[in-house]
Amino acid sequence: MGAVIIRFLVSALSLGLATWVLDGIWLDVTDRPADAVLTILIVAAIFGLVNALVKPLFVFVTSPLLLITLGLFLLVINAALLMLTSWVCAQIGVGWGVTGFWSAFWGAVIVSVVSFILNSFVGNRGERHT
């Protein structure tokens, strides 16, 4: 259970970093830092649900492209998932969004790299690598 929470927090951190670094990914909250953290945690939960429910279908349908591009098409899939997350956030009134494909693409790159690096410190069962 602890590994799930750590991976969720890693996802939230990587989404927060992408939001902070890229102009095309925005966060609309008041001046209170607690509101920004809560919003990013909500976005991470939505992104996790979108990844769990939609990504397997996208990967299956685009598997020939994934093979041809040696997996690099996953960045396009992740960009589409960020855009879908942005749409869901808009529908439920969460103040977070992505303005276009290229912002989503570079956001997907940041989220993927940061998540990979941070998750490399967490073992399969939540054990730390030494």
Image: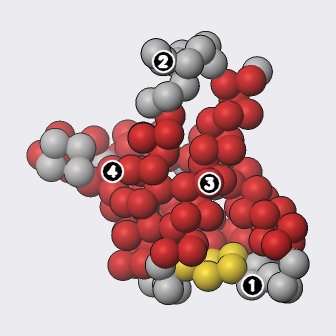
Q: How is the image coloured?
A: secondary structure
CA separation, marks 4 and 2? Answer: 27 Å
Q: Position of residue 85 (x, y in %)?
A: 62, 65
Which residue is under mark 4?
74
Which residue is under mark 3?
13
Q: Is residue 90 visible?
A: no
Which residue is under mark 2?
129
Figure quadrant of residue 8: top right
Q: Nearer the viewer, residue 91 or 98?
A: 98
Q: Nearer the viewer, residue 94 or 62?
A: 94
Figure quadrant of residue 37: bottom right
Q: Position of residue 46 (x, y in %)?
A: 71, 55
Looking at numbered disc 2 in the image, what kind of residue is underneath it?
His
Sequence-first disc among 3 and 4: 3
Residue 125 higher or lower than 116, as above or below: above
Looking at numbered disc 4 in the image, what kind of residue is underneath it?
Leu
Looking at numbered disc 1 in the image, what kind of residue is underneath it?
Asp
Sequence-first disc among 4 and 2: 4
Of the numbered discs in the image, which one, if any, rests on residue 17? none
Q: Quadrant of the N terminus?
A: top right
Q: Nearer the viewer, residue 110 or 94?
A: 110
Q: Is residue 35 visible?
A: yes
Which residue is under mark 1?
28
Looking at numbered disc 3 in the image, what kind of residue is underneath it?
Leu
At mark 3, the secondary structure is helix
Answer left or right for 10 relative to 119.
right
CA separation, marks 3 and 1? Answer: 17 Å
CA separation, marks 4 and 1? Answer: 28 Å
Answer left or right for 38 relative to 97.
right
Q: Position of residue 20 (x, y in %)?
A: 57, 74
